[in-house]
Structures are given as C-alpha cells and as structure tokens.
C-alpha cells in the first residue's frame, strides 16, 4: 500500500483544552482539518516512539467517530505505527480505553491511545466532536504533551496517509497490511466491552452486589435505575448490570449509543438528566445514576431522587474504601480532588491519616500522583470519580462502588450520606455555569476581578444580612509534587475566614464562546443541627449573591441567570 503526502496549510486554534480538542462538527468537516490534527497527535503524542508503536483507538459513538477512526487508521499506517487496537465500529468508552492501554494487548505494552469524544457536549451534525490523546500510563496527555501537539499542528505543512487502505472496523478480527517503506501494519478490531467488564469483575465482588440487588442482603430487592443517555456506557451497563447482575433491562435507560445521543445533552446533572430525576422521584427505585457521552462521568441519586453531590460521593467512597475488594489488598496512600471540588474528602483523609492533594481542574493532573503511588482515589465536582485502577474518571466504576458500599454497610444512599454528614459535617456546594457567553466579556470579568482581588484581604462582604470576611484571595496555581511542573492561573479563589469560598474560572471544554463557572462552597459542622439538612441553594444564597455582585456577572455577561446550576 502506497503512502501519499498531502500538503496543507496549518489550521489555527487546534489547541487541546481541559480534555482534548473539542470543536463543532462543522469545523472538523473542513477539508484536511481532522487529518492535520491527527498527524500532530501522532508526532507530538508518540514522539520518538512513533514508528513501530502500538496505539488504541475508539470513541463514544458520536457523529464523525467512524469517519475519524478510518482516517486515523490510514494516517497511522502512513506514519509507521506498527499496531492499532480498534474498538468494533470504532467504539470505546473513555474508561475502557484507559484500561486497555494499561493492561496491554496480548502481552504487548501499548504506547498510547486516541479517544474520539467531546464527552458531555451534545453530538450530531450540529453538535461537537473531539479528539484526545492518552499516554502510555492510560491517562490524558499532560500539558507538556498537549502543548507539543498544538505547536506541531500550528506549523504542520503536510500529513501522510494511505488512501488505499481499507479496514472493516465493523467486524472483529485481525487485519494485516503491507505498507511501503514500513512493512507490516496490524489492526486488531476488538469487542469494546470484554476487557473492561473483566476489570470491573476483578475490582468488585459481583456476587455480593448481585445478592444486594436481588433481596438477599436487605431482605428486599435493591432496585436500580440507570440512564446511559445514549452515550458510551450503554453496552457496558447492559453487559454488567443486565447480563451478569441480572437487573431488569427496563431499569436500564437509553443504553443504545446514538450518533446524536438521541438529541439529548449527555451531561449527567440535575438539569440534563432531569427525566431520570423525575422517574426516581416516584420512589420505585433505591439508587439511580446517569453517565455522560463518553462514560467517564456519573451522577448518583438515592431513593426519591436524593441528590449526592459529586464532592460528597467522593468523600463517602473514601470513607468506605475498605468495602471495595480492590482496595483491601493495597495501601491507601492518599486521596485527591480538583481545586473547585468541595473539601469533604479532605476531612476523610485527615481522619484516616492519609495524604490529600488539591489539583487543577482536569483528570490529567491526577496521573502523576497515581503513577507515583501517592494517591489511589480522586474526584471532581463535575461528576467525575475514579481510582488508580485506570487513569481516567470512570462512571460505571463509581456506580458499582456505591452498590458495593451499600451491600457492605447495609444502608441506603441517603442514609449513608446523612451518616457521613453527622460524622464529618457537610461541605455544601453549588456550581453556576454561564454557557456560551461572549468571550470578550468573560475575559474582562476575570481580569477585572483579579485586579480587584489584591485589595480583598480583610474586607467584609455581605448579602441577605450575612457577612463574610475575606481571608485570602488568589489565582490558584499547582506545583506537581512528582515532576515539579508548575501550572498557573487555574481559577480565582476568594476564601473567607470561616472557610467558605467562591471560585471563578473559564471552562476549557467548550467549543463556542466562553463558559464561566462559578463554584461556591461552605462548611456546616455536625453540631449545627439547624443547618445540616437545609437545601444547598438556601444555605449558599448569600455567598452566591456576593460572588455575582463582586464579579459584576450581569454587567460583563448580560446574563441574569446561569444556564445550569449543579
Ligand atoms: C470540565 C470539568 C472538569 C472535567 C472536564 C472534562 O472542564 O469542569 O472537571 O475534568 O470537563 O470532563 P472545564 O474546563 O470545562 O471546566 V469530560 O467528562 O468532558 O472528559
Ligand atoms: Co466525559
């Protein structure tokens, strides 16, 4: 098979954000756009190892996935990649790719992975598409690598492609090609589920979870309701929950992956997964969960739609970590959370005498800590929870973790969370998102606030008759304790003397305009009985009003209300 070199002019803006390059489908459909970026990913991501390397490829099934997989196969062949492991029909969830990279393939180590997804962003011809590179540890490429990819993409003048190479990704099996100048090129098209299902089986006690679901532990069945939102978790959920754990398939919603997620916004929160919330509200089910487009996010709900904040979910799993068989045989060295995530898990770490790390937003910052064995469990407020079994957050894993904890503790979801609050206090949290605001206004808001912050220390701020005094105000920066790299400008934090705070940052996963995220949290001590069980929105109202006032949100964005509150 011959190789063609195609001359291109570089595209502007192929800069990976929090988690890969995400753009409108329209943009990816420009001639050579995808090919240009794929060439840059192979050069920048694999570096010296490129020729002869082994790479995993797959995505969440959204519009353009199959086209992109075919392009990646042809470009990989022309770049001397030795071996590709491709999910059948180009399909893999994000956690599954991470798991396969770490496990290797038939005894052979894997050098990286290319994941095709725009995660929780809508799909379809009018939605978003994305490409992300993961390194040999299975985790999202760190900034040093994505910077290299961006630089290469910005200067690229040609890419290489084997136009005549056809590989049938619809059919599992091994395909071998002979590429001019490089020789043998192998593509293994594999079942996207089996390795992941085996991994889950090795982490959890499926028999015990099955016993819980079918009434043998609590004396009554423990009924689940899951919403895969037509995203990547569907096949994994069907395989684990229906085939193995024998749940009734009627309780497994939207498990068929669709190119446009059936028109929904595949983001598991109270707004976009409202139909799940409503169904759970009817009280027929004991636990519910929704997952995002690529299967790495999860939202956990209890009976009657009792909402578990992701920050609390992480803390409850941390506190009950010994319930999960995987952790019983290993040393629990530490936990981690991203900076905007409420600090509930910090209190658990303290009680257990293990380390706690506070990292910038994005899963890529957890990888080094896990690789160095310094941390085994982590999470983000954005519905991300995971452990060192892989190097991505993992929606199905988080749900199974909850089932395992319920089975061991013999307590329902709400009961577990309230017992947690009674023991540690409650880190009340909310996030306001202002999506797709005009970029100029969003940048001005941040610049304006940061400039003022110099004078904030000691200042009193009030709303609704409540006054807070500023303790510190800064722009978060993180020094990676493993490789010493510094990541700055990760969010403006205003912390008050009682530990309450608000944080503002700009999203790095949007595809149009800017998204401003406002994070607010406050701590209620276990002794403060009158407040412990109040709704979060009520408890945080004064802090939210202060944040909106101080940041001049409405003036800069023209928005009176956020797009989404989580
Ligand atoms: C968002 C979340 C962040 C998460 C990232 C990727 O980033 O805030 O916590 O890691 O999405 O998640 P940003 O920059 O938009 O705030 V996913 O499920 O898109 O891979
Ligand atoms: Co995701």
Image (tube, helix red, strand yellow):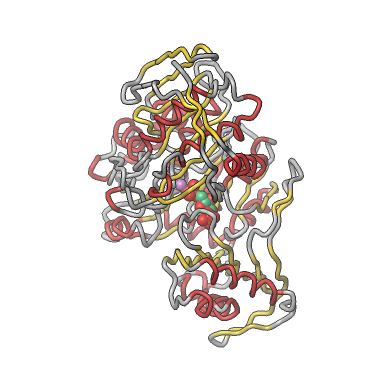
Foreground residue, 426 or 148? 148
Based on the displayed image, in which of its 4 quarters is residue 74 positioned? top left
Foreground residue, 26 or 301? 26
Residue 53 in picture, x, y percent from top left: 57, 22
Residue 369 falls left or right of residue 35: right
Residue ranking furthest to the bottom: 465
Q: How many marks?
A: 0
Is residue 57 visible in the rendered structure shown here? yes
Residue beneath the point at 37% across and 62% down: 271
Residue beneath the point at 40% across and 53% down: 267
- Quadrant of the drawing holding the N terminus: top left
Is residue 311 visible in the rendered structure shown here? no
Residue ranking furthest to the right: 484
- Quadrant of the drawing holding the C terminus: bottom left
Residue 445 in picture, x, y percent from top left: 59, 73
Residue 236 in picture, x, y percent from top left: 36, 35
The answer to whether 108 is drawn above or below residue 363 in the figure is: above
Residue 215 falls left or right of residue 455: left
Residue beneath the point at 72% across and 71% down: 472
Residue 4 in picture, x, y percent from top left: 48, 24
The answer to whether 56 is drawn above or below residue 535 in the figure is: above
The answer to whether 248 is drawn above or below residue 2 in the figure is: below
Based on the displayed image, in which of its 4 quarters is residue 65 positioned? top left
Residue ranking furthest to the left: 250
């Amino acid at each position: 098979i011959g190789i063609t070199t195609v001359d291109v002019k570089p595209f502007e803006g192929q800069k990976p954000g929090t988690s890969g390059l995400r753009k409108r489908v329209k943009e990816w459909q420009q001639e050579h756009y995808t090919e240009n970026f794929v060439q840059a990913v192979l050069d920048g991501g694999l570096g010296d190892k490129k020729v002869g390397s082994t790479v995993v490829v797959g995505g969440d099934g959204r519009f353009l996935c199959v086209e992109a997989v075919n392009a990646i196969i042809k470009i990989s062949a022309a770049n001397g990649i030795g071996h590709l492991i491709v999910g059948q029909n180009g399909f893999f969830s994000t956690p599954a790719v991470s798991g396969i990279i770490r496990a290797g393939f038939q005894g052979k180590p894997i050098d990286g992975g290319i994941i095709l997804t725009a995660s929780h962003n809508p799909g379809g011809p009018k939605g978003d598409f994305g490409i992300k590179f993961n390194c040999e540890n299975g985790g999202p490429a760190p900034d040093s690598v994505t910077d290299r990819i961006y630089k290469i993409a910005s200067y690229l003048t040609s890419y290489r492609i084997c136009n005549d190479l056809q590989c049938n990704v619809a059919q599992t099996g091994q395909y071998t090609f002979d590429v001019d100048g490089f020789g043998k090129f192998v593509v293994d098209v594999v079942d996207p589920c089996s390795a992941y299902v085996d991994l889950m089986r090795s982490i959890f006690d499926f028999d015990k979870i099955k016993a819980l679901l079918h009434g043998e532990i609590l004396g009554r069945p423990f009924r689940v309701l899951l919403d895969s939102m037509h995203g990547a978790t569907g096949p994994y959920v069907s395989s684990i929950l229906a085939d193995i754990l024998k749940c009734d398939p009627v309780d497994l919603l939207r498990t068929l992956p669709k190119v446009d997620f059936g028109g929904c916004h595949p983001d598991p929160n109270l707004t976009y997964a409202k139909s799940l919330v409503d169904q759970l509200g009817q009280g027929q089910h004991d636990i519910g969960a929704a997952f995002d487009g690529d299967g790495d996010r999860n939202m956990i709900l209890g009976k009657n739609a009792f909402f578990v904040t992701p920050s609390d979910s992480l803390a409850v799993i941390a506190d009950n970590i010994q319930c999960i068989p995987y952790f019983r045989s290993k040393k629990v060295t530490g936990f981690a959370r991203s900076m905007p995530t409420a600090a509930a898990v910090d209190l658990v770490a303290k009680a257990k005498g293990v380390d706690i790390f506070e990292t910038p937003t994005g899963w890529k910052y957890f990888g080094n800590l896990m690789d160095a064995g310094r941390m085994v469990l982590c999470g983000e407020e954005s519905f991300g929870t995971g452990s060192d079994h892989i190097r991505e957050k993992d929606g199905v894993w988080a749900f199974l973790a909850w089932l395992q904890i319920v089975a061991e503790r013999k307590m329902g979801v709400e009961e577990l969370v309230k017992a947690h609050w009674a023991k540690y206090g409650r880190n009340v949290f909310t996030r306001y998102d202002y999506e797709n605001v005009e970029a100029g206004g969003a940048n001005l808001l941040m610049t304006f606030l940061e400039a003022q912050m110099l004078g904030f220390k000691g200042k009193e701020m009030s709303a609704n008759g409540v006054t807070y005094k500023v303790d510190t105000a800064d722009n978060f920066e993180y020094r990676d304790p493993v490789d010493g790299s510094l990541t700055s400008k990760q969010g403006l934090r205003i912390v008050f003397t009682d530990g309450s705070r608000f944080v503002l940052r700009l999203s790095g996963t949007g595809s149009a305009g800017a998204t401003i995220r406002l994070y607010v949290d406050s701590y209620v001590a276990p002794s403060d009985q009158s407040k412990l069980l109040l709704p979060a929105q009520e408890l945080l109202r004064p802090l939210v009003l202060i944040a909106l006032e101080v940041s001049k949100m409405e003036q800069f964005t023209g928005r009176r209300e956020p797009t989404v509150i989580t």
